[in-house]
Image (cartoon, coloured by chain):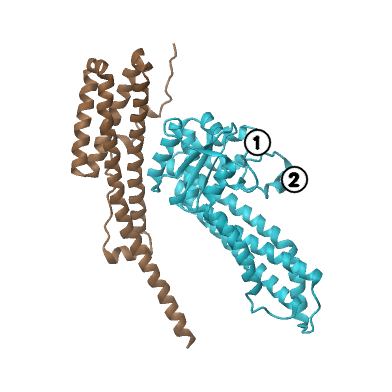
Amino acid sequence: MNYVYVIVAILGVILLWLISTYNFFVSSKARIKASIQEIGNQLKRQFDLIPNLEESAKAYLMHEKKIYDALTEARKAISGAIKSGDVQKMSDAGSKLSQVLPQIQVVVESNPELKASEVIGKLMDELRDTADKVMYARRLVIDLTADFNVKRVEFPSSLVAGMCKFDELPGLITPEKGEHVEVKGKEIQTPKVDLG
Amino acid sequence: MVNIYEAQRANKIKSTIIVAGFFVFVTAAVYILVQATSVYMGYEFGGLGFMGMALIISGISSYVGYYYSDRIVLSISKARKADRIKDFNFYTVTENLAIASGIPKPKLYVIEDSAPNAFATGRDPEHAVICATTGLLDKLNRTELEGVIAHELTHIKNYDTRLMSVVSVLVGIVALLGDWFLRIGFHGRKSDNDKGQLGAIFLILGLVFAILSPIIAQLIQLAVSRRREFTADAGSVFITKQPRGLIMALEKISADMEPLEVANKATAHLYIVSPFKGNVKGAVGRFAGLFNTHPPVKDRVKVLSGMV
């Protein structure tokens, strides 16, 4: 009689494992969806801050027409991305703004009045902080997707993934070939620093 | 060079081994002490009697401590709530890293003390608290602060407060049972129901365990605490994707010789670097090292520097 109990116990453990693995996959998918919404949330925060920056620094920014145009373009990209809800568009829009920020930083640093202004100082801190937040929100999507994809191919959870037909999730699309993953000859050489 | 996923996996395995070893040791100690006590008293208390009492006593005090850990520690440490404007870096760094690790932002508090240190507590990520001293917030730059906060967030995410509470309940049970057995030895009476050879063995084993097991259990508890610190360091690198910030923060904090005024032995294990500074070298230092809640900063920096 005893070995019937043993078999039932073993089957019970296997069933529990199956359920918990399946739950991991479906809950991961839901979490990834939520984390994509988080990127949209952070982008919206950036979007709301930009008009303040433009207002406070308008006089100076107007002189730097390139920067002003880049800002406007970034605003359009962000609002379009938030409307579409597409994670790739959101990621690209976030990058657009991150690229403009250093240029604005240069303008602020080279203008003593702008530099001394506490309002501008706080705004620049907030802008840099929102750029960080978008970066961390993207990172969460990457990490969650990685966990999902790893479990999908690892044995024995790959059996559950195969049975329930879970496909590989793309996460954030980054081209796997290109400049950013190559190191060219010049980059390997030690840079010469000229302080003269 | 060890990549961060390997480091995390290694830490998980080592943690599990130490904690499992701890449970095995406690089970053995409890079994022997309960048996020895009942042999001495001449009858069996239905097996679970003494152990049940010890569990209740140890359990209630530890559970209350664990459940209200955030409030208790804050009241001991004289902390004030953090403010987004005054403590901009602290506040925004924690916000950002909480997004990256997928847990809600913990409540933030600041202690007015020039000694740099930080700790995290709370029974689960929804009730978590991170506390930093003004000394830490002034001395570290934003990248170093990110390393420290990521370390604390990893403690919260790994439910380390819960783990250490369970461990200390078990240490308490072992200590209580050992204590009772020794007391019965002084006051108890010889039983008529002599169990003979087996009884004698249990009595001797009981004596040995009663004296040694509380200290052995404590040493294992401290080993668990040290392993969780290494795990939290690895978790910090996982969140921030670079070990430099935490390395520089640890070196800055340990270089500061000032003792933390509000620290005491009960809360020492929660801080990022042990608030009790002692630098004894040699064999004595190594032996004293077994009683440390934290691994030496040198070892932590060495492990961190090897991570990719």
On the question of residue B308 being in view, the answer is no
- The residue where tag 1 is placed is B259
Please, what secondary structure does the residue beneath circle 1 have? loop
Please, what secondary structure does the residue beneath circle 2 have? helix
The answer to whether mark 1 and mark 2 are in CB contact below 8 A is no
On the question of residue B106 being in view, the answer is yes
CA separation, marks 1 and 2?
22 Å
Pointer 2 local density, CA inside 10 Å: few below 14, some 14–19, many at least 20: few
Q: Mark 1 falls within which chain?
A: B
- The residue where tag 2 is placed is B284
Between residue B304 and residue B26, name the one nearer to us. Answer: B26
Between residue B307 and residue B300, name the one nearer to us. Answer: B300
Q: Position of residue B28 (x, y in %)?
A: 65, 69
Pointer 1 local density, CA inside 10 Å: few below 14, some 14–19, many at least 20: some
Residue A86: quadrant of the picture: top left
Residue type at numbered disc 2: Val
Q: Which chain is cyan?
A: B
Chain-order first, disc 1 or disc 2: 1
Q: Position of residue B2 (x, y in %)?
A: 49, 46
Residue lying farthest to the top in this orientation = A196
Decide if residue A51 is on the left or right side of residue B267: left
Residue B174: quadrant of the picture: bottom right
The correct choice, above or below, for B164 with respect to A115 in the image is below
